Amino acid sequence: MIWAALGALLSLTVLTGAMLGAALGLTGFAILHFFAGGSMRLGVQAVFNVLGEFTLTSIPLFILLGDVLVASGLAGGIYKALSPLFARLRGGLLHTNIAVCTVFGAVSGSSMSVSAAVGSVAYPELIGRGYDKRMVVGSLAGGGTLGLLIPPSLSLLIYGALTDTSIGKLFLAGVVPGLMMALLFMIYIEIKARRHPGLVPAEAPLPWSQTLRATLAVWPILVLILAVLGSLFLGIATPTESAAVGVAAAALLGFTMGDLTLARLMQTFVNSARTFAVIAFVFLGAVILAQSISVLQLPQKLLEGISSVGLSPLLMLGVVVLIYLLLGMIFDGLSMMVMTLPVVFPLLTGLGYDAVWLGVVITIMVEVGMLTPPVGMNLFVLVGISKHQVNLAQASIGALPYWLLLMLGLVLLTAMPGIATWLPSLSYK
């Protein structure tokens, strides 16, 4: 009865055209009113408690950090610094796309920001050199997903805030899987380039002396990564403080080594505020819905039902992954995550799955959604950057191998959970 009511209310509010945050919040209030004795005040109290959390303030700061880097043009500097190094491989500058997305993801935290920042520099450069359009867009769409996995990650931040899981542990857990996915992407590119040489023009490598000299120019971003992640992992700063340090360092680098101006800096504040307003609205609606689900103990009842049926934890994980794949075709990654976590988190942790490991798994599923049409946001970003030289269908085909590799990464994480849990276990004993 309650599950039918929950599904019907959520579907009704979404179909009315209400914003997702409003749909989630209204559904939560309705559940509290009709099924929990009119205790709507519990939803208001939950929102008040969340708004008072210090960790939540790091989200707009990390968004601002990425916007400052884009506005300063430092992403283009990273690309020029790393291009000579990877031009020596058969995949050429496609490898540079993945490498720059990895580096940029270590200071941005947003998949779309990474795709947009790197894509705006890389797409015209590679097309001008004769690279296949679908391979270029695919590598940028796939590489952009690394912004959600490699810390600092908005996905892991929101997951930690919603589930009360250590942000530091989550960030550490994303490092090895993020590097693993970058390596898998580059292996695929190299194999594809060797099997179909006509898709990738041969790059003339520079002498090693010039290559190393060019690569050393990436040091400003490495300093920024050290300022953000180093202060966090060493326990010197909280996530919010490390984000603030990163914004200050990015602004300083932007003014001294990039193209940042005071007017552009002011515009980044406006853009970041707008982005966070959308995220916060969805987040608060999810908090109200989570409170209603928690009050009625729906996850516990679902867990009891699964236990009585005899469904194994692995099979249950497979069901959850399938649900995320279907939802990824309809909702953006953030909405999908905050909408499902109130049920998925207690359900899977109740079956014995580690909370930190689960955060990485759900982040990968969010990444998969970023590449899944018709709502794959990374695909739309790159279609826009290409000025519609590549349509959504072509971008989807180009990104398909990276979609499959993300699913392979999920299988590897399930078979070897230590990929995600090893690094946090060393630092948090």
Image (spheres, grey):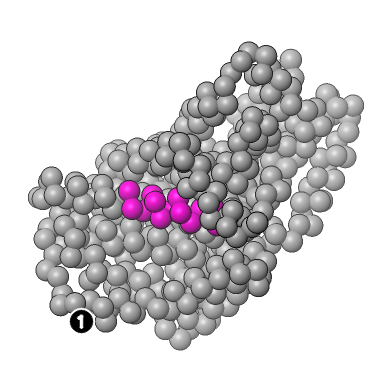
In magenta stretch: residue 183: yes
Q: Residue 249 at x, y = what percent?
A: 54, 78
Q: Is residue 70 above or below residue 349?
A: below
- Total numbered labels placed on residues in the image: 1
Among the 4 quarters of the image, the one containing residue 427: bottom right
Query: The C terminus is located in which quarter?
Result: bottom right
Relative side of 351 to 323, left or right: right
> In the image shown, does 345 or 415 lie closer to the viewer?
415
Residue appearing at x 32%, y 65% in the figure: 121
Q: Which residue is mark 1?
A: 209
Residue appearing at x 40%, y 78% in the figure: 219
> In the image shown, does 417 or 390 lie closer to the viewer?
417
Q: Is residue 291 above or below residue 37?
A: below
Residue appearing at x 50%, y 46% in the figure: 418
Q: Principal SS element in the magenta part?
A: helix
Bounds of the magenta span?
172-184
Q: Residue 300 at x, y = what percent?
A: 74, 26
Relative side of 47 to 73, left or right: right
> In the image shown, does 346 or 342 lie closer to the viewer?
346
Q: Residue 288 at x, y = what percent?
A: 75, 40
Q: Residue 327 at x, y = what percent?
A: 51, 32
In magenta stretch: residue 236: no
Query: The N terminus is located in which quarter?
Result: top right
> In the image shown, does 173 or 195 lie closer to the viewer?
173
**Residue 386 seen:** yes
Which amino acid lies under the numbered mark 1 shown in the image of this protein? Answer: Ser
Q: Secondary structure at mark 1?
A: helix
Residue extending furthest toward the bottom? 256
Q: Is residue 181 above or below residue 228?
A: above
**Residue 395 seen:** no
Q: Residues within 10 Å of mark 1 (few under 14, many from 20)?
A: few
